[in-house]
Image: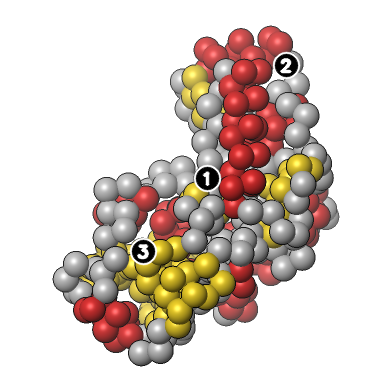
Amino acid sequence: MNILENISLKPYNTFGIDATAKSFVTANSLSDLQEIISFEKDIFLLSGGSNMLLTKGIDKLVVLLNLKGITVEEFDNNHVLVTAEAGENWHDFVIWCISQNYGGLENLSLIPGNVGSSPIQNIGAYGVEIKDTFYQLEALEIATGKSHVFYNSDCNFGYRNSVFKNELKGLFIITKVTFKLTKKNHQINISYGAIQSELTNKENPSLKEISNAIIAIRESKLPDPKKIGNSGSFFKNPVIDVVEFKKLQKKYPDIPHYIVSESEVKIPAGWLIEQSGFKGKRFGDAGVHEKQALVLVNYNNATGQEIYKLAQQIQQTILQIFSIDLEIEVNVI
């Protein structure tokens, strides 16, 4: 086991924050992981590095999860179970599924990160979430080194949430994830206006055409982490009481919104941030992206503390203006 000392994590997080790991090791297999946790249980697990903001160095063993592989099992006449190892790149996995004509994940194209972290956050976009196709996952219990299977109902999926962000946080390492996908008669979701605009004159778009539309939309407004450090959407879209929403609507008649239930309405966080005057603003090397206010960026050498300070300033301003608590989606370390 090759354990390295005092390693910069800048290449391993999409924000490009230059934090230092006291020690660092790469796990390329399940047996590697089992060996690691047999001698050290106080670890920091690193996957795609796409949903975190490092505000300090990591004073423990950082384990880079690099498990690779994809397998397929027939489920019934119209479904397959596709299993990906935790270290597979999420977008590459989605594109592979589309190339096999397996439907269900196309709306989740170009989301950064790896497969293993996707259920933790219940990642979602354009009307689709992981929970819609999730079948099961396998996870290694750190305390015992034993593998456990979690089915959909075990994960307590919610909006950008799961059991692994709450009561089981830090107790398991997800090693592989299985999705139940369609082979034919795909149930596509192109209800979002932006998708329909991108798919003009296509009555029955293919999985690839839907994926390409999603990619085009995301690329038009989201910065490439390889060029500008970021972690995608930094804040959750707040869900508020319908009574509070109606009060806001009187003051802001054009406020965009989505009906969640009879009593709740979802407001785009990006709109709130833009209305508060932060869109495109730069504070040293930390800033708010010029095309999508939901995305905080590291223009060059911002520290995690500087980006977090900006996030807190945005939260305080929106609370003052709209009386809405904006919740951070990214894991602040």
The residue lying at 68 percent from left, 47 percent from top is: 296
Rendering coords of residue 40 (x, y %)? 26, 74
Q: Which mark is residue 135?
A: 3
Q: Which residue is mark 2?
A: 252
Q: Earlier in the sequence, mark 3 or mark 1?
A: 3
Q: Earlier in the sequence, mark 3 or mark 2?
A: 3
237 relative position to 5: left or right: right
Dot 3: element: strand
Q: Which residue is mark 1?
A: 329
Q: Of discs 3 and 2, which sits in the foreground?
A: 2
Q: Earlier in the sequence, mark 2 or mark 1?
A: 2
Q: Of discs 3 and 1, which sits in the foreground?
A: 1
Q: Is residue 78 above or below residue 319?
A: below
Q: Is residue 150 above or below residue 83?
A: above
Q: Is residue 258 above or below residue 101?
A: above
Rendering coords of residue 212 (x, y %)? 73, 65
The CA distance from mark 3 to mark 1 is 24 Å
The residue lying at 38 percent from left, 79 percent from top is: 74
**Badge 3: residue crowd in 10 Å (few <14, some 14–19, many ≥20):** some
The CA distance from mark 2 to mark 1 is 25 Å
318 relative position to 332: left or right: right
Rendering coords of residue 321 (x, y %)? 66, 18
**Badge 1: residue crowd in 10 Å (few <14, some 14–19, many ≥20):** some
